[in-house]
């Protein structure tokens, strides 16, 4: 009994800190989502409106009047899903390349992690001004040199640009996790597969990939949480445009609070984003668990 009480004495401070850092802000967000609070009109008092802020976005009866929110939800899912698929495939392939004892591999691994440590807003400004600019950027210079028509990617292909930038930023994270899994594969297993006559393809996809499946799952689930909340790259490159074609839910929160000055509606979108994220994580976890049970 004494040992158990001592154990709780070490756990309770950690639980208190985690609760203060995560649950208290979320509870405040839920409370704000029930208020009508206009920052541009401080003369108007904050008013309790219940679920009216959620109804503003979610109601179906006037669906032709409110199509943008559902489009933004779909865009968020497409951005996140595309990024996770591309990062998983490229991350595995790049991790295979870096999992070799060749000259310069340590330098390559270090350079690979570079984008992961760059601030999203700074990276967005650099990409927009020095690369995607059709007049002064590298893209514009290259297109002119090749004699190709100049297409403003930021305005005509905003979703593709955002997915590309998300992949650029989060691919190092996937490579780091998957590479850690590959380096944990026992050497005797690989040697045994070679003795048994397995070729490179069989060794890679029938032995290594199943052995690092847990690492892949961790990368995908954490990547889902990280990517779905991305905001800085959208703000500094496309600014959500043209129109709302490159909005995601976090950017909609920003626009509701700082552009429309509607704290309650912004908090409502935040709560919806959390619910959507938890739902996707739960579905992903269930699919992984079901596949693991099938495979035994």
Image (cartoon, rainbow, N blue to C red):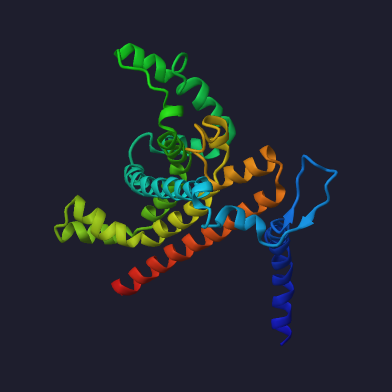
The residue at 40%/20% (across/down) is 139
Residue 118 visible at all = no
Q: Nearer the viewer, residue 229 or 90?
A: 229
Q: Nearer the viewer, residue 1 or 164?
A: 164
Figure check: 32 above or below 262: below
Residue 169 visible at all = yes
Q: Residue furthest left?
A: 197
The residue at 46%/37% (across/down) is 162
The residue at 38%/34% (across/down) is 104
Q: Nearer the viewer, residue 286 or 170?
A: 286
Placement of the N terminus among the 4 image quadrants: bottom right
Placement of the C terminus among the 4 image quadrants: bottom left
Q: Residue 127: x and y, percent? A: 49, 27
Q: Residue 292: x and y, percent? A: 35, 70
Q: Residue 195: x and y, percent? A: 17, 59
Q: Residue 176: x and y, percent? A: 45, 47
Tell me how many marks there are.
Answer: 0
Using residue 232 as the reference point, say whether residue 44 is left or right of it.
right
Using residue 123 as the reference point, say whether residue 183 is left or right of it.
left
């Amino acid at each position: 009994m004494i040992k158990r009480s001592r154990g709780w004495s070490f756990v309770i401070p950690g639980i208190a800190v985690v609760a203060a850092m995560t649950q208290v802000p979320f509870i405040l967000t839920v409370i704000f989502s029930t208020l009508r609070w206009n920052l541009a009109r401080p003369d108007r008092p904050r008013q309790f409106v219940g679920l009216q802020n959620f109804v503003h976005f979610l109601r179906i009866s006037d669906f032709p009047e409110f199509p943008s929110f559902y489009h933004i939800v779909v865009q968020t899912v497409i951005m996140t899903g595309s990024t996770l698929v591309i990062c998983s495939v490229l991350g595995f392939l790049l991790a295979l390349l870096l999992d070799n004892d060749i000259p310069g591999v340590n330098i390559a691994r270090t350079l690979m992690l570079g984008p992961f440590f760059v601030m999203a807003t700074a990276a967005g400004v650099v990409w927009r001004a020095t690369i995607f600019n059709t007049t002064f950027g590298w893209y514009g210079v290259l297109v002119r040199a090749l004699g190709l028509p100049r297409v403003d990617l930021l305005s005509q292909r905003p979703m593709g640009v955002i997915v590309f930038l998300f992949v650029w930023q989060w691919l190092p994270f996937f490579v780091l996790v998957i590479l850690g899994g590959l380096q944990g594969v026992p050497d005797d297993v690989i040697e045994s597969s070679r003795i048994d006559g397995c070729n490179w393809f069989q060794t890679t996809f029938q032995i290594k990939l199943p052995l690092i499946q847990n690492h892949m799952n961790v990368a995908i689930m954490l990547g889902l949480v990280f990517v779905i909340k991305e905001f800085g790259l959208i703000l500094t490159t496309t600014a959500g445009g043209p129109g709302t074609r490159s909005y995601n839910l976090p950017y909609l929160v920003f626009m509701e609070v700082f552009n429309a000055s509607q704290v309650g509606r912004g908090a409502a979108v935040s709560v919806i984003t959390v619910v959507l994220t938890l739902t996707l994580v739960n579905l992903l976890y269930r699919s992984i668990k079901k596949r693991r049970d099938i495979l035994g």
